[in-house]
Image: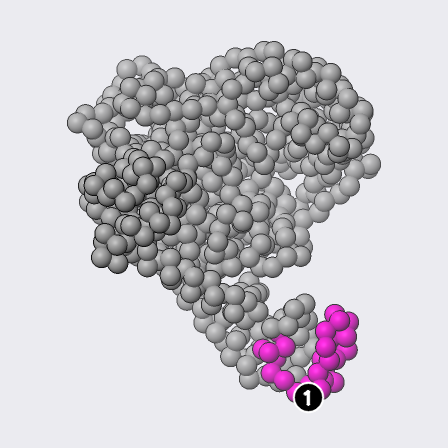
């Protein structure tokens, strides 16, 4: 009935979709197996992509040929660049998406790929022989063979939904949980755990009083996520901001005795940086109010997502409390919020390629690895898809360094440090964040994708080369152009910067804090004319590289020092127990996690700098 596939991807969420595309665009014949074809690329929680650090990840996915960025751009209803008041390393794109259009567009792109087939059914087990994964087994007993399998099961593995004192099996509202895989993996020697996440109520927007809420408009300049020239929606839809109050908090407290979070029924750890409303009230008892982002689910629906009100309290408590929020007095609820517990597998059981150590040709991506967020999941899916294809074709894995991408930071953290709570990416996790900006993801990563052989990179490389050329031309023009005190001093006074007493080159003035290139262009019409034909995003990249060239050079130097350790490979059969100079903890951790390089070994929790020195001495370094 089925041919033998190169790669089977189990699960069609954000990780699964990117995994299927990644393997298929390298030439693998892929089967995407999902329990429900109608929920491919479903946005299970908030209808948004990007955010702080997450936006950088989406741009990196796009630069590597993934589809999350382009789908977001084509279906967004609002776009904002966050953190613009801070330095460029912190700028993070975020978009509200039309939930239904987002999923529909993803499915269209998947179906347009001739290398991707689909099968709708629960996968209950894996075909494993001689320590190698060789396919899947489905609920009706079908065995489908493949060279590699990527598991992207999300919250479905033995998923358990909690609403107050009620609990029932499910991987998402209205969908059943997946069973069988966890039990088999445990038998194969995998360690598993439980995690928790949650979602807020969905509300009828027709019942809200929008006039009393704060309006949050999108940016006028919609740069988007994709580096391709895609047509973006013209009209944006505003979001709104509301606030809880003391009455809301007291009502919520009335339900604490029936909360599965507080009475011990939920055992899994939830996301630290996206707590439920009851957790916020309990942990921050001194706060008089909490912000709620009232977000539309799409252009053609009245359904509203109440971001910031995630809850597993009884539905009557959620309903009563929300009606006490100003603007929600006549609120009608579509469905209550809930918490969900699910199985995950500590990612220290993975190689840096996301292949499992216990079973060859088996890869994990997404929430099965203990992460939270669409963006983190999608990036892992893409990397697992790439590496599944490379593994079955006897090619070395595709590994991104911490100095090359947030994706590299994410996977390195997971594999070497593990996680005991849902892992979320932040800019603070990246030690080279000035190098890893959202504006230069194409320059960093598209050449790597082209070298890897990802389909359709010719157009992207053409844009990369154009961008490099424009950046150089802008710098050259600024180095040649002078500006006089008469032209600059009124502007400099307005931004409280020291006046000029003689002509200077524009490039030196641009290096001052608070001086912006668009402002200088207004002062120098000839410069404006010279730049008028350039893509404004390319000009912005030139400005960033000029203003931060000292910091960029310093981070590059730091990265090069660390990369020397990354180039020192450790033989995978190395017996750490022979080195008695290593600490007992280091011998145990290194023997278990089997780092590929000295650099990777240095980031394993419990391995000290003195342990690394011992390894370097042993290697003659």
Q: Residue furthest left?
A: 130
On the image, which quarter does residue 67 sit in? top left
On the image, which quarter does residue 582 sit in? top left
x, y percentage for residue 96?
A: 61, 41
Q: Residue at x 51, y 19 (%)?
A: 267
| Residue 373 visible to an observer of this rendering | yes
Q: Residue at x 62, y 18 (%)?
A: 262
Q: Residue furthest front?
A: 581
Q: Residue at x 32, y 55 (%)?
A: 565
Colour mode of the rendering: one colour
From what the image shows, is residue 559 above or below residue 157? below
Quadrant of the drawing holding the C terminus: bottom left
Quadrant of the drawing holding the N terminus: top left
Q: To which residue does mark 1 refer?
A: 502
From what the image shows, is residue 590 above or below residue 127? below
| Residue 66 visible to an observer of this rendering | no
Frontmost residue, 352 versus 75: 352
x, y percentage for residue 588?
A: 30, 35
Q: Provide the residue span drawn in magenta.
A: 484-510
Secondary structure at numbered mark 1: loop
Q: Residue at x 76, y 20 (%)?
A: 251
Q: Answer whether residue 541 is magenta in the image.
A: no
x, y percentage for residue 567?
A: 29, 56
Estimate how packed mark 1 is, as few (under 14), some (14 to 19) or many (20 or more) residues with alpha carbons within 10 Å: few
x, y percentage for residue 158?
A: 43, 18
């Amino acid at each position: 009935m089925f041919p033998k596939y190169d790669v089977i991807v189990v699960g069609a969420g954000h990780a699964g979709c990117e995994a299927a595309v990644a393997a298929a665009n390298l030439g693998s014949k892929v089967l995407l197996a999902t329990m429900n074809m109608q929920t491919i690329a479903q946005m299970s929680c908030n209808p948004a992509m990007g955010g702080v650090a997450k936006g950088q990840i989406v741009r990196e996915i796009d630069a590597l040929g993934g589809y999350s960025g382009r789908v977001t751009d084509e279906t967004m209803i609002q776009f904002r660049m966050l953190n613009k008041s801070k330095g460029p390393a912190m700028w993070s794109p975020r978009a509200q998406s039309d939930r239904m259009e987002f999923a529909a567009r993803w499915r269209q792109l998947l179906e347009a790929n001739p290398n991707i087939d689909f099968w709708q059914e629960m996968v209950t087990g894996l075909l494993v022989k001689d320590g190698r994964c060789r396919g899947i087994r489905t609920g009706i007993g079908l065995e489908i063979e493949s060279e590699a399998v990527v598991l992207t099961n999300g919250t479905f593995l033995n998923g358990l939904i909690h609403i107050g004192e009620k609990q029932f099996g499910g991987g998402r509202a209205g969908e059943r949980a997946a069973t069988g895989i966890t039990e088999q993996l445990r038998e194969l020697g995998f360690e598993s755990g439980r995690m928790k996440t949650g979602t807020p109520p969905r509300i009828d927007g027709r019942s809200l009083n929008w006039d009393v809420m704060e309006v949050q408009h999108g940016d006028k300049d919609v740069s988007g996520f994709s580096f391709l020239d895609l047509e973006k929606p013209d009209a944006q839809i505003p979001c709104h901001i509301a606030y809880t109050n003391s009455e809301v908090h007291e009502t919520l407290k009335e339900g604490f005795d029936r909360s599965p979070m507080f009475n011990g029924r939920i055992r899994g750890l939830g996301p630290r940086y996206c707590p439920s409303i009851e957790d916020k009230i309990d942990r921050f008892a001194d706060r008089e109010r909490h912000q709620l982002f009232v977000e539309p689910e799409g252009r053609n629906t009245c359904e509203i997502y109440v971001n910031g009100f995630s809850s597993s309290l009884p539905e009557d408590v959620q309903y009563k409390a929300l009606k006490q929020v100003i603007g929600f007095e006549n609120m009608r609820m579509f469905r209550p919020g809930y918490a969900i517990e699910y199985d995950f597998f500590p990612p220290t059981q993975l190689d840096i390629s996301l292949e499992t150590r216990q079973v060859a040709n088996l890869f994990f991506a997404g929430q099965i690895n203990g992460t939270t967020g669409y963006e983190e999941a999608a990036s892992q899916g893409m990397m697992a898809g790439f590496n599944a294809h490379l593994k079955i074709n006897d090619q070395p894995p595709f590994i991104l360094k911490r100095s090359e991408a947030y994706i590299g930071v994410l996977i390195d953290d997971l594999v070497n440090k593990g996680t005991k709570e849902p892992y979320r990416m932040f800019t603070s996790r990246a030690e080279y964040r000035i190098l890893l900006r959202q504006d230069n993801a194409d320059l960093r990563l598209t050449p790597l994708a082209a070298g890897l052989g990802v389909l359709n990179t010719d157009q992207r490389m053409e844009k990369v080369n154009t961008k490099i050329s424009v950046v150089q031309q802008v710098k050259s023009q600024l180095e040649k152009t002078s500006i006089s005190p008469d032209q600059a001093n009124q502007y400099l006074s307005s931004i409280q910067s020291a006046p000029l007493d003689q002509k200077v080159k524009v490039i030196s003035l641009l290096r001052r804090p608070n001086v912006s290139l668009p402002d200088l262009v207004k002062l120098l019409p000839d410069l404006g004319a010279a730049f008028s034909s350039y893509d404004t995003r390319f000009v912005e990249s030139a400005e960033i590289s000029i203003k931060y060239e000292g910091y960029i050079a310093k981070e590059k130097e730091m990265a090069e020092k660390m990369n020397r350790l990354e180039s020192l490979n450790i033989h995978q059969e190395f017996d750490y127990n022979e080195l008695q100079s290593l600490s007992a903890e280091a011998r145990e951790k290194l023997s278990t996690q089997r780092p590929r390089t000295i650099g990777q070994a240095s980031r394993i929790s419990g391995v000290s700098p003195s342990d690394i020195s011992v390894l370097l001495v042993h290697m003659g370094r």
